[in-house]
Image: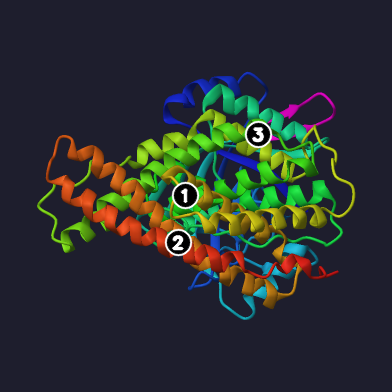
Amino acid sequence: MHEIELKFQIPETRFASLHRQFLQGPTEAVRMQAHYFDTADGLLARHEIALRLRLEGTQWVQTLKASGAHGVSRLEHNAPLPADDAPTATAGAPALDIDRHRGSPAHRRLVDVLGGAVLHEVFRTEVDRLVRVFALPGGTEIEAALDTGQVVAGSATHPLREIEFEWKAGPLHGLFALAADWVAAHGLWLDIVSKAERGTLLSRGQAHPAAARAKPLQLSADADGPALARAAIGSCLAQVLRNASAVAAGSRQPEHVHQLRIGLRRLRVVLREMAPLDCGLDPGWEAPIAELFRALGVDRDQQILEDETADALVAAGSPPLTRPRPSSDAGALAAWVQHADVQQVLLAAQAYAMGASEVGGGAHDGPAVDAMAERLDALLHRLVAHSRRFVEASVDDQHAVRKELKRLRYLAEFIAPLYRDKPVARFFDALAPAQDALGRHNDLAVARAAYRERAESEPEAWFAVGWLSAQQARSARAARKALKRAGAAGPFWHGTPRR
């Protein structure tokens, strides 16, 4: 079976009010103790599989979960153990037996991954759960679980305070509508790091999962507009939600911030470029994610000033300067991600990707890839025109060219899996030097503006302004050359899509 649930973290200051509201309906209290198993080298965790034995009240249940097509859906198989099937193993738990899941899709995934590797207990969870069932208009049934407790791996512990909404029956959009109400009321934020993954990280002494990069779309060449747009939004969210979960939990790792920005930029490209394909794409999603994108960009720019630029100036012979002001702390970045407007957009976009939005309908006749090819042609032609006058353009116009180049790249990436590998690789290889050159040029422009402002009160900063101006002049010429080569890239979308 497929499990579809939305899990949220609860701000400490809002827990009491949420708890009171949760108790306004009939609830059932369940104390749970779960033991999670994996190989010594974390084979199951690497393949996004979780295998556990959990005591729910007085009933032991063996559960196998594996990742599904969306970050909020999973393959799941539960095997309740008969009372007499309890030969005890470690800590009084029944013995593990993977054959209890035989015949399920999750079991097939487990067997393929596990081979002959040996499983052992890696961590456990101790949870007090309150369960409440919501019966919504239209026949939707949602089971909500309010969990408090801890994850334990050896001597290390991690507190748990979260709420899950699991779809059980009826129209799926009811799940997202209910979750949106609780997000608005209690400041919840989406977290796709499961208890199993949290325990694995704890057992390894890690606070956050690795940053997530973009993955190719799974798409057919004859996909219509809504199908392409949903697949693209789903691809963006897979990248955004994992990195957003880490940043919202306090990560300040540059790669989390960087990959979150890339995911948000890709999401904005879909909203701007694929709107004609499906009227279900809400233009109102743009503003909150643009605000988050800008906040993350300020932090990223400040990190470059603190590290790379400051070091380069010292190497160039700059007089002593105070280091730039500290950039945003992890708490400030977390607050941006946790903001209610951002969370509501992420929820709405996830509903859209899963076909659970109440608004939809195509606005384009024929295969969507044809419409994307026309738009890509236009963007590529504009790139050629920009390359001719790039050096003379204003800083703002140069930055706009960089954004347009990224738009070309990301839009092309969405349909690239439909075409032969070699033409696709040649196209992106031609674009890569231009992306790098424009990125360096933009970093210099940002740094020059920052040091120009500092020079008003710190005259020693004029050295930095002069040095950065000279570097910027050279980088503009290098960017123009790279843009010219990128403009000559062969458009792979002129080929025949794979069927």
Range shown magenta: 132-144
Looking at the picture, which amino acid does disc 1 mark? Gln
Q: Quadrant of residue 478?
A: bottom left
Task: Work out whether mark 3 precedes mark 2 in sequence or the reverse, and give the earlier one.
Answer: 3
Verify whether residue 137 appears in magenta. Answer: yes
User: Label 2 neighbourhood size at 10 Å, few (<14), some (14-19), many (20+)?
Assistant: many
The percent coordinates of residue 221 (x first, y second) are 83, 62
Badge 3: few (under 14), some or many (20 or more) residues near its Cα, within 10 Å?
A: many
At a point 15% along the width and 35% down the height, the residue shown is: 457
How far apart are labels 1 and 2 at the CA level? 10 Å
Could you tell me how far apart the alpha carbons at marks 3 and 2 are, in whole angstroms? 53 Å
Which residue in the structure is indicated by mark 2?
479
For the C terminus, give its image quadrant. bottom right
Callout 1 environment at 10 Å: few (<14), some (14 to 19), or many (20+)? many
Q: Residue lying furthest right in this view?
A: 365
Disc 1 and disc 3: Cα gap in Å?
50 Å
Q: Position of residue 361 (x, y in %)?
A: 85, 38
The three-letter amino acid code for the residue at tag 3 is Ala
**Tag 1 residue:** 398
Q: Give the residue pinned by disc 3.
A: 144
- Could you say whether the residue bearing mark 2 is in a helix, strand or loop? helix
Q: Main secondary structure of the magenta part?
A: strand
Query: Sequence-wise, which precedes: disc 1 or disc 3?
Result: 3
Foreground residue among 88 and 307: 307
Task: Please identify the residue farthest to the bottom as the structure is shown.
Answer: 116
Q: Report the side of 220 relative to 264 (left or right).
A: right
Residue 9 in view, yes or no: no
